[in-house]
Amino acid sequence: MSDNQLVGTIVLYVNGREFDCNSVSPKIMAGRKAVPTMNREGRVRKKTKTIKSIGLSLEVFVDEVDDFDWESVEDARVVVESIDGGKRTTYIDCSVTDVSESYKVDGEATRSLEMFALNKIEE
């Protein structure tokens, strides 16, 4: 999403169910890594290429009775769409790696999910 477009909806799709999200923070790991080696300067002087990967941090709204097994989520889809529907970013084949709970005074219960995605599609 560009800086001048507002996000309209963030939805997590798991096995045909939809979950509204409060926020999503994608992190693209570019596939480069510093390689520490023994040298006189005591600093990193080498680098290597690794594989590119996509990490996602999501906050998902949950009901009062949250009976969903968040740890077992695999092959999910996260869709981020602009307000006017002109721009859509979809992260596919997402799997959960970490789950934490959050409760707020306003009565909102959320789950914070750390995920990885296998692919990103921009439409």
Image (spheres, rainbow, N blue to C red):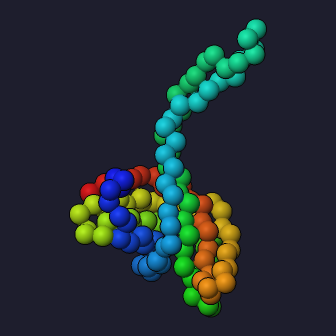
Furthest residue in direction front, as rendered = 4
Residue that appears at 56% across and 60% down: 57
Q: Is residue 115 above or below residue 12?
A: above
Q: Classify residue 61 by image quadrant.
A: bottom right
Residue 79 lies left or right of residue 96; in this view the side is left
Q: Horizontal and vertical percent for residue 41?
A: 73, 11
Residue that appears at 62% across and 26% down: 34
Q: Horizontal and vertical percent for residue 37?
A: 71, 18
Q: How many marks?
A: 0
Q: Horizontal and vertical percent for residue 77?
A: 43, 66
For the C terminus, the quadrant is bottom left
Nearer to the camera, 35 or 109: 109
Q: Horizontal and vertical percent for residue 42?
A: 75, 16
Residue that appears at 68% across and 74% down: 101
Furthest residue in direction top, as rendered = 40
Q: Is residue 69 above or below residue 41?
A: below
Residue 53 lies left or right of residue 82; in this view the side is right
Residue that appears at 41% across and 59% down: 91
Q: Is residue 37 above or below residue 100?
A: above
For the N terminus, the quadrant is bottom left
Nearer to the camera, 71 or 23: 23
Q: Is residue 52 above or below residue 68?
A: above
Furthest residue in direction bottom, as rendered = 65
The answer to whether residue 67 of the structure is visible from this angle is no
The answer to whether residue 114 of the structure is visible from this angle is yes
Q: Classify residue 88 by image quadrant.
A: bottom left
